[in-house]
């Protein structure tokens, strides 16, 4: 019986995790880019 290569499996999991995280980051940045840039959030602490 062949010996399992756990290091290879671990590396594949890490690569998949990084890929998923990067896709999520790109999707999140794409959603932010679709919002208008000239509209700024109003802060409630402007009264001084």
Image (cartoon, rainbow, N blue to C red):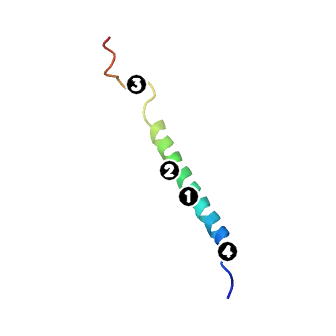
Read off the residue under disc 3: 40
Task: Report if the CB atoms under discs 1 and 3 are less than 8 Å apart.
Answer: no
Tell me the number on the disc at residue 24: 2
Local SS, label 4:
loop
Lower position in the chain sequence, tag 2 or tag 4: 4
Task: Report if the CB atoms under discs 1 and 2 are less than 8 Å apart.
Answer: no
Label 3 packing within 10 angstroms: few (<14), some (14-19), many (20+): few
Q: Could you tell me how many numbered marks the image carries?
A: 4
Q: Which of labels 1 and 4 is toward the front?
A: 4
Whole-angstrom CA distance, mark 1 to mark 4, is: 19 Å
Whole-angstrom CA distance, mark 1 to mark 3, is: 34 Å
Whole-angstrom CA distance, mark 1 to mark 2, is: 11 Å
Whole-angstrom CA distance, mark 3 to mark 4, is: 52 Å
Q: Nearer the viewer, residue 39 or 23?
A: 23
Lower position in the chain sequence, tag 3 or tag 4: 4
Q: Which of labels 1 and 3 is toward the front?
A: 1
Side (left or right) of 40 relative to 20 = left
Tell me the number on the disc at residue 17: 1
Q: Which of labels 1 and 2 is toward the front?
A: 1
Whole-angstrom CA distance, mark 2 to mark 4, is: 29 Å
Read off the residue under disc 4: 5
Image position of 48 with respect to 6: above or below: above
């Amino acid at each position: 019986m062949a010996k399992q290569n756990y290091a290879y499996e671990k590396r594949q999991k890490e690569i998949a995790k990084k890929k998923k995280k990067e896709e999520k980051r790109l999707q999140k940045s794409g959603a932010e880019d679709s919002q208008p840039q000239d509209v700024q959030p109003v802060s409630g602490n402007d009264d001084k």
